[in-house]
Image (cartoon, rainbow, N blue to C red):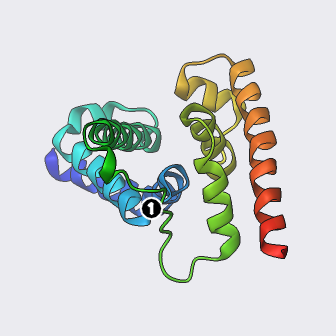
Amino acid sequence: MHEDDDDAIRAVYDLSYRRLVTQMLALCGNRSEAEDVVQESFLTALTHRADFVAASNKEAWLRTVALNRLRNRWRRARVAGRILPRFRAELSIELGPGAPEDHVAVVYALSQLSAQVRLTAVLHYIADLSVAQIAHELAVPEGTVKARLARARTQMAGHLSDRQEADHV
């Protein structure tokens, strides 16, 4: 049975890996960190086969695991920043070589949003989930999703227009 499970995980990997990395990249702004948390989510699928196989939406299951890994990293970094404030790093967006400037600008604008608003925007605009799907995945009312998307659009528009003005000066 493990071989069939491994084949199922491999098939989901082939189908979902790039999408998941793109989503995590939009959330964290760092390609290697995004790749790490997605790889870790697939390792978790291997070590928790029964849970993974039982999941009705395997990509959502992996996204949740990757997001939890990312949150844990952020939590550890925040604690380390309080303990060792002089070692706090400035926001560093690393999308990889040759990333277009507009992608960097969008990821920067996303990074300025609160975590819940950013996650909602990424799930809607990058993962291409509907309002209803996001509400189900995040266990929040659809009205909350709509409000977060409106907030994301407003705040990102401000950040993107500020950046465009700075580029033209």
Q: Secondary structure at mark 1?
A: loop
**Foreground: 50 or 20?**
20
Whether residue 127 is visible to the viewer of this picture, yes or no, is no
Whether residue 85 is visible to the viewer of this picture, yes or no, is yes
Circle 1: residue type: Asn
Quadrant containing the N terminus is: top left
Labels in figure, total: 1
Residue sitting farthest toward the top: 141
Residue sitting farthest toward the front: 86
**Foreground: 89 or 121?**
89
**Foreground: 164 or 7?**
164
Residue shown at 67%/42% (left/top)?
124
Quarter of the rendering containing residue 143:
top right
Tell me: residue 135, above or below residue 84: above
Instruction: Give residue 57's position: percent from left, percent from top.
Output: 46, 37
Quarter of the rendering containing residue 82:
top left
Quadrant containing the C terminus is: bottom right
Residue indicated by mark 1 = 30
Tell me: residue 22, above or below residue 61: below
Instruction: Give residue 126's position: percent from left, percent from top.
Output: 63, 52
Instruction: Give residue 121's position: percent from left, percent from top.
Output: 66, 42
Tell me: residue 49, above or below residue 168: above
* In the displayed structure image, the side of residue 39 where residue 14 appears, left or right: right
* In the displayed structure image, the side of residue 122 where residue 154 appears, left or right: right
Residue shown at 46%/39% (left/top)?
60
Tell me: residue 67, above or below residue 107: above
Residue shown at 48%/52% (left/top)?
28
Mark 1 neighbour class, 10 Å CA radius: few under 14, some 14 to 19, many 20 or more: some
